[in-house]
Amino acid sequence: MSQVRDEAADVLVHSLDPEHPANHICTLCAKFYTLGWVTGTGGGTSIRHEDKIFIAPSGVQKEMLKPTDMFVMDFASKEYIRKPKVLKPSACTPLFLAAFTRGAGCCIHTHSQWAVLITLLVEREFGKDACFEIEEIEQIKGIPKGRGKVGNLGYFDRLRIPIIENTAHEEDLTSSLEEAMEKYPDTYAVLVRRHGIYVWGDNVHKAKTQCESIDYILQLAVEMKNLGLPWTK
């Protein structure tokens, strides 16, 4: 009976469709590795597809992921319906779920150096309670106005990304992340001081493009600070 259950669970991650979540996560993580976002097994990606959540495992080199490495969770019950025997569930899972319960279709966690540097610069310049703010940068137009709102931010709009404090264990970030989501309901990202960033979107395409746009903005902001240029007027 156990073998039958295992075989049924394995069907969930086998598909010839490159955009099937189990395949798509592998492709995305391999690309993120080349960007320096998921080095040393860090970071992760999760996709919600209909009533299921596909999650990359913990402690695995993300550029070498295989579809059979994926964990699959039932969204309604939050129970795993597929667990690879030799791998550990991602410690990011409760944070991914926080995004999914707010309507996201994909959540990406990176250890981008630019994200880490921005959290340190904001702390030095504005204090621990400040969020990252920037305006009049063209790439801001790649970020949506907010959940339930139509369209993206404009050139003259101000992008705000909250920052939460890091913890010794990833799952302990959940309550702080949820508080930041409530305080900044229009945000699609949360920075974690000295750690990285969580970015989510309505679907995989939007989450990916928003993560790319934000990382570009963060890198630009670091260089602006080096040149003594202000982020806001």
Image (tube, rainbow, N blue to C red):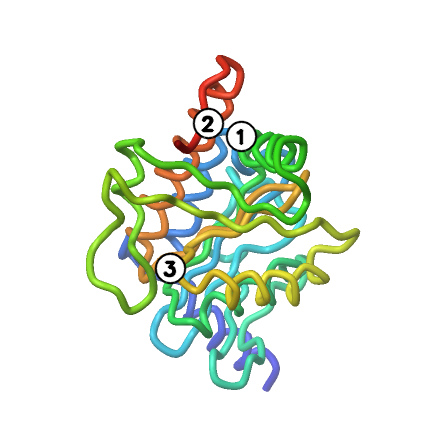
In the rendered image, residue 39, in percent from the top left (x then y), is placed at 59, 33
Which residue occupies 49% across, 74% down?
9
> x, y (%) of residue 184?
47, 60
Q: State the separation of the CA atoms marked 2 and 1.
A: 9 Å
Residue type at numbered disc 3: Pro
Whether tag 2 and tag 1 are in contact, CB under 8 A, the answer is: yes
Q: Nearer the viewer, residue 90 or 82?
A: 90
Residue 97 sits above or below residue 228 on the image = below
Residue at the farthest right position: 168
Q: Are marks 3 and 2 in contact (CB under 8 Å)?
A: no
Mark 3 lies on a secondary structure that is helix
Farthest left residue? 151
Residue under numbered circle 1? 114
Question: Of circles 2 and 1, which is in front?
Answer: 2
The residue located at (41%, 70%) in the rendering is: 11
Residue placed at 60% from the left, 68% from the top? 83
Q: Which mark is residue 221?
A: 2
Instruction: Mark 2 or mark 1: name the one nearer the start of the chain.
Output: 1
Disc 2: CA contacts within 10 A as few (<14), some (14-19) or many (>=20):
many
Mark nearer the N terminus (1 vs 3):
3
Residue at image mark 3: 21
**Amino acid of disc 1:** Trp
Q: Residues within 10 Å of mark 1 (few under 14, many from 20)?
A: many
Classify residue 137 as left or right of residue 29.
left
